[in-house]
Image: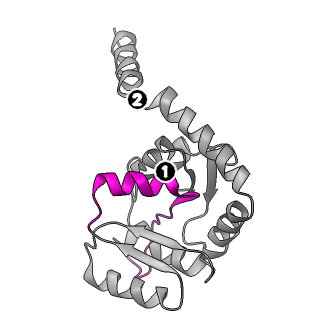
Amino acid sequence: MPHKGINYLIEAIDPDIRLDVYGKPYDERYRRDLEILAEGKDVHFHHNASDEEIAHAYATSLVAVLPSVHEDMYGTKVAEPELLGLVLLEAMACGAAVIGSNVTSIPEIVEDGVNGYLVPPNDTNALRTEVRRLCSSPRHAEELGRNGYALVRRQFTWAATAQRCLEAYRSSD
């Protein structure tokens, strides 16, 4: 969907960097526009991947990117482009470093420079800078991935989530 900002990521990727894009195309015009942007680049679209294939992609990726935007490439405004940023949590749960736009809830799960990087929305140059940084320093990307994995284990397991809910219920008395 256009508010995911994948067009900015494709524009940011250097031709020698492989980019795998996962997700069903819900907007045919956007899908076609992404394919045009990807011409001449090492971009691969996976529209019907299974959960297992997606988990494998996260686990074997250097970085996962969610460049969501408040205003898409067509000028459509979206107040809340991400309610949680589940893509980033899934990637962290698989040990991948992450890059996310500094929108809505994403800064609540991505600590800039600790488990990933935050970039301004609609900013191709900032995306390019962070992707290049991680590609040029795989050890740093692995460190961010370990930190993200630890965050997910600490705060986002079912047990941790249930515990926070119970504490919230108790505090409302």
The range drawn in magenta is 48-75
Q: Nearer the viewer, residue 133 or 142?
A: 142
Q: What crowding class fits label 2: few (fewer than 14 Cα within 10 Å), some (14-19), or many (20 or more)?
A: few
- Whether residue 151 is visible, yes or no, is yes
**Nearest to N terminus: mark 2 or mark 1:** 1
Tell me the mark number nearer the camera, choosing from 2 and 1. Answer: 1
Residue visible at 56% across and 53% down in the picture = 98
- Horizontal side of 72 relative to 101 (left or right) equals left
Q: Position of residue 99 (x, y in %)?
A: 58, 57
Q: CA distance from mark 2 to mark 1?
A: 18 Å
- Horizontal side of 137 relative to 22 (left or right) equals right
Tell me if label 2 and label 1 are in contact, CB under 8 Å. no
Residue visible at 27% across and 58% down in the picture = 50
Quarter of the image with the C terminus is top left
* Residue, disc 1: 59
From what the image shows, is residue 57 above or below residue 154?
A: below
Quarter of the image with the N terminus is bottom left
Q: Which mark is residue 157?
A: 2
Q: Which mark is residue 79?
A: none
Q: How many marks?
A: 2
Q: What crowding class fits label 1: few (fewer than 14 Cα within 10 Å), some (14-19), or many (20 or more)?
A: many
Q: Position of residue 121 (x, y in %)?
A: 55, 66
